[in-house]
């Protein structure tokens, strides 16, 4: 297992849009190293004879029912602009 280097921590911090001081970067590196060590311990487990755990999750979603939607007039009633049955907005780029 490789050792986390400060350049890796700084790269991760940059990608995460975080500004870390040197002590914070060292602490983050140590914590990340601990997490990777735990993951390595999990890889060493012999799971060949272990059945996967499957649980039925109760669905809290409502039934998908058909209903009458908005008419064209209702949908575009308050639209600032529309063209060919589409909302029109100012160009952003």
Image (cartoon, helix red, strand yellow):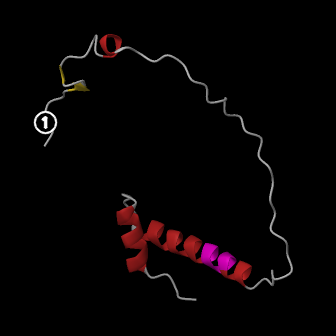
Q: Is residue 15 above or below residue 85?
A: below
Residue at 15% from the left image edge and 38% from the top image edge: 92
- x and y, in percent, of residue 84 in the image: 19, 25
Q: Is residue 59 left or right of residue 15?
A: right
Foreground: 14 or 24?
14
Q: Is residue 14 above or below residue 72?
A: below
Q: Position of residue 79 (x, y in %)?
A: 25, 16
Which residues are drawn in magenta?
34-39
Front in this rendered view, residue 36 or 73: 73
Locate the C terminus by quadrant.
top left
Who's the residue at 40% across and 65% down the image?
13
Does residue 36 show up magenta in the picture? yes
Q: Which residue is mark 1?
A: 91
In the shown orientation, is residue 50 left or right of residue 41? right
- Majority secondary structure in the magenta region: helix
Residue 66 location (% of width, % of height): 57, 23
Residue placed most toward the observer, 75 or 90: 75
Q: Residues within 10 Å of mark 1 (few under 14, many from 20)?
A: few
């Amino acid at each position: 297992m490789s050792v986390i280097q400060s350049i890796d921590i700084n790269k991760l911090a940059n990608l995460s849009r975080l500004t870390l001081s040197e002590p914070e970067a060292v602490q983050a590196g140590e914590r990340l190293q601990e997490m990777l060590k735990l993951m390595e311990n999990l890889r060493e487990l012999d799971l060949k004879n272990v059945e996967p755990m499957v649980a039925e999750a109760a669905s809290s979603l409502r039934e998908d029912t058909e209903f009458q939607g908005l008419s064209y007039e209702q949908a575009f009633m308050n639209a600032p602009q529309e063209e060919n049955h589409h909302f029109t907005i100012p160009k952003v780029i």
